[in-house]
Image: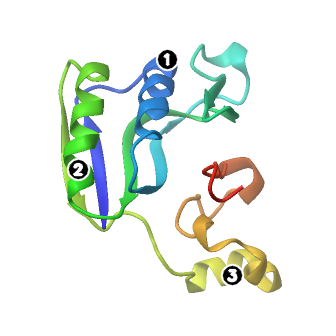
Amino acid sequence: MDIQIFPYRILSADTTENLLRELNEIEGIHRMVLQGERLPESEIGHPDRRVIIVKGEEIDLQVKTGRILMEISDEAVIEKVKEVSEPHLPFGFDIYAGTFIRKEKTVSDNLKYGEKLDEIPDEMVGLTDQTAHLSKRATILRSKKES
């Protein structure tokens, strides 16, 4: 099951970082995708283009966060996500349930990655822009159990 947090405003880098830190503490969230307007390549171009720290990992924030998509284990997680989000998003937000993240490799993936398609981890499917280089567009944060 997928959910989408749709804030009433675009999030700053600080808000994104703080919200992601707390969301990562919730059991039952399998993966997350940040969607939004792409930020300029250099920090000089925009103050929100910076490295954020989530789960001890450095992540180059490449978008001005407009939506957060999550793959979750069950509906009980939605209430926990709401509780965590409220202090960080005092201006309001909506949470929608649906299908937002692709779960299977597609013909487009095959065209983009060719023979290397089988080398792409399953958890990366549906997380990246098809036209972008994979290594520059996604970061996998492993739980302590998986390490």
Task: Kindly identify the amino acid type of the residue bearing the numbered disc 2.
Answer: Ile
Image color mode: rainbow
Tell me the residue that label 3 is attached to.
Answer: 111
Q: Is residue 4 above or below residue 92?
A: below
Q: Is residue 104 above or below residue 50?
A: below
Which callout, 2 or 3, points at the residue further toward the start of the chain?
Answer: 2
Which callout, 3 or 1, points at the residue further toward the start of the chain?
Answer: 1
Q: Nearer the viewer, mark 1 or mark 2?
A: 2
- Residue 70, visible in the rendered structure: yes
Q: Is residue 87 left or right of residue 19?
A: left
- x and y percent of residue 45 in the render? 66, 18
Q: CA distance from mark 3 to mark 1?
A: 37 Å
Cβ–Cβ under 8 Å for marks 2 and 3: no
Q: How many marks?
A: 3
Numbered mark located on residue 78 in the image: 2
Task: Kindly identify the amino acid type of the residue bearing the numbered disc 1.
Answer: Asp
Q: Nearer the viewer, mark 3 or mark 1?
A: 1
- x and y percent of residue 91 in the render? 20, 19
Tell me the residue that label 1 is attached to.
Answer: 14
Which callout, 1 or 2, points at the residue further toward the start of the chain?
Answer: 1
Cβ–Cβ under 8 Å for marks 3 and 1: no
Cβ–Cβ under 8 Å for marks 1 and 2: no
Residue 56 location, quadrant: top right
- x and y percent of residue 69 in the render? 38, 51
Disc 2, SS: helix
Q: Is residue 33 left or right of residue 144?
A: left
Task: Kindly identify the amino acid type of the residue bearing the numbered disc 3.
Answer: Leu
- x and y percent of residue 72 in the render? 35, 60
Q: Quadrant of the C terminus?
A: bottom right
Q: What residue is rendered at 55% in x and 83% in y?
A: 106
